[in-house]
C-alpha cells in the first residue's frame, strides 16, 4: 500500500448508499475502510473495493465503538482523510406513539454517532491541513414529514452539525458538507414500502409508486447518484457548509 494514498472511512458501508460510496471512493483511488454491523455485508462491499479494503464490523451506537473503529483504521492505514458518515435508519409512527426508547435510538444513530465520528476525525485532518467530511442527511434534514418526527429531528440536527463544524474549521483545509437524498432505491426504502403495505393494505408495487411520486422525476434516486454527490464534495475544496439535495427536484433550496 502506498503511503501517498489517502484513506476514506465509510460508516454503514454494508449496503445501499454506503456500499455505493465505498465503491466510488475505491474506484477514485482511495484506500477504503468499511464499518457496519454485518460482517457478511461488509465482506461483499469489500469484494467490490479491491484487495486492500479494510473491514471493521461494529455497532456504531455502542459506547466506545467510534474510538475502536478509528483505532483500527489508524493501525492498518493512517488517520482517515475522508469520512463519509452514512450509517442511519428510521422508525415510523405518529408522534404520540413514539416511545422514549425510539426517540433516543434515532438520535443515537442519526446524530450522536455522526457527531462522535466528526469529533474523532477532525484533529488529524486539521493537523494535516486537508480533510473531507460528508454526512448523509436526507430531505428530512430540510423539511418536516408526518410519522417520522424522531428521524426528522435527528436529520435536522445533523445538517446543523455540518454547518457549525464547517464554520469552525473553514480556514484549515477541511471541508464539511451534507448530501441530502430523497427516497433512494435501497434497503431503507424497502422497509418504508413494507410499512406502507402493512398500514394500508396496498401492494408493494403500489407502495413503491407512492414513494416514487413524491419526487418530481417520478422515480427513486439510485445509490450511485448519491455517491456521485459525495465524490463532488470530496473533490471540491471550495464547497463547505452545504447541504446538497439529491432528490429529483423535490426540495429547491
Image: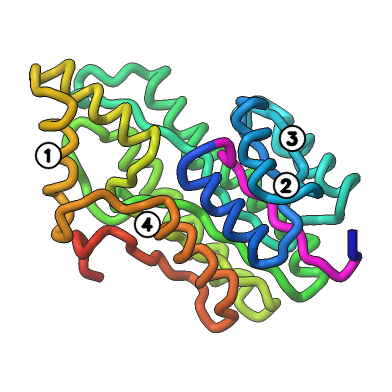
Magenta-drawn segment:
3-14
Give the class, few, some or many, for how many residues have Cα within 10 Å of label 1's Cα (few <14, many ≥20).
Answer: some
Mark carried by residue 180: 4
Observer-side mark, 4 or 3, equals 3
Vertical order, 106 against 178 (above or below): above
Front residue of this view, candidates 25 and 90: 25
Residue in the image at 64% along x and 55% along y: 83
At x 43%, y 60%, the residue is 179
Marks 4 & 1, CB-CB < 8 Å contact: no
Secondary structure type for disc 3? strand
| Sequence order check, earlier mark of 4 and 3 | 3
* Secondary structure under the numbered disc 4 in the rendered image: strand
**Would you say residue 110 sits in the magenta stretch?**
no
Q: Disc 2 to disc 4, how far (Cα)?
A: 22 Å
Callouts 2 and 4 close, C-beta under 8 Å: no
Residue, disc 1: 210
| Residue density around tag 4, few if under 14, some if 14–19, many if 20 or more, within 10 Å | many
- Residue at point 76%, 75% (across, down): 129
Q: Are marks 1 and 2 in contact (CB under 8 Å)?
A: no
- Tell which of 235 and 122 is nearer to you: 235
- Residue 167, picture quadrant: bottom right
Question: From the viewer's perspective, is 196 left or right of 187?
Answer: left
Colouring rule applied to residues: rainbow
Tag of residue 56: 3
Q: Position of residue 67 (x, y in %)?
A: 76, 38
- Among numbered discs 4 and 1, the one appearing first in the sequence: 4
Outermost residue on the bottom side: it is 238
Are the residues tagged 3 and 2 within 8 Å (C-beta)? yes
Query: What residue is shown with label 2?
Result: 33
Amino acid at each position: 500500500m502506498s503511503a501517498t494514498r489517502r484513506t476514506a472511512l465509510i460508516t454503514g458501508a454494508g449496503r445501499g448508499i454506503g456500499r455505493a460510496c465505498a465503491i466510488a471512493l475505491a474506484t477514485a483511488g482511495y484506500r477504503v475502510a468499511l464499518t457496519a454491523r454485518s460482517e457478511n455485508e461488509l465482506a461483499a462491499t469489500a469484494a467490490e473495493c479491491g484487495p486492500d479494503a479494510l473491514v471493521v464490523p461494529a455497532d456504531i451506537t455502542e459506547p466506545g465503538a467510534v474510538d475502536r473503529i478509528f483505532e483500527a483504521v489508524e493501525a492498518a492505514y493512517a488517520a482517515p482523510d475522508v469520512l463519509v458518515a452514512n450509517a442511519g435508519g428510521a422508525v415510523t409512527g405518529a408522534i404520540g406513539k413514539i416511545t422514549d426508547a425510539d426517540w433516543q435510538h434515532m438520535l443515537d444513530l442519526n446524530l450522536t454517532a455522526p457527531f462522535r465520528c466528526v469529533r474523532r476525525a477532525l484533529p488529524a485532518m486539521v493537523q494535516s491541513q486537508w480533510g473531507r467530511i460528508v454526512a448523509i442527511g436526507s430531505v428530512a434534514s430540510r423539511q418536516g414529514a408526518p410519522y417520522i418526527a424522531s428521524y426528522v429531528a435527528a436529520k435536522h440536527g445533523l445538517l446543523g452539525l455540518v454547518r457549525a463544524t464547517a464554520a469552525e474549521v473553514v480556514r484549515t483545509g477541511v471541508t464539511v458538507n451534507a448530501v441530502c437524498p430523497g427516497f433512494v432505491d435501497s434497503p431503507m426504502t424497502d422497509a418504508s414500502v413494507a410499512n406502507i403495505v402493512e398500514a394500508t393494505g396496498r401492494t408493494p408495487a403500489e407502495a413503491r409508486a407512492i414513494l416514487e411520486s413524491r419526487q418530481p422525476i417520478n422515480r427513486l434516486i439510485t445509490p450511485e447518484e448519491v455517491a456521485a454527490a459525495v465524490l463532488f464534495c470530496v473533490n471540491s475544496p471550495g464547497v463547505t457548509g452545504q447541504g446538497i439535495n439529491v432528490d429529483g427536484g423535490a426540495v429547491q433550496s
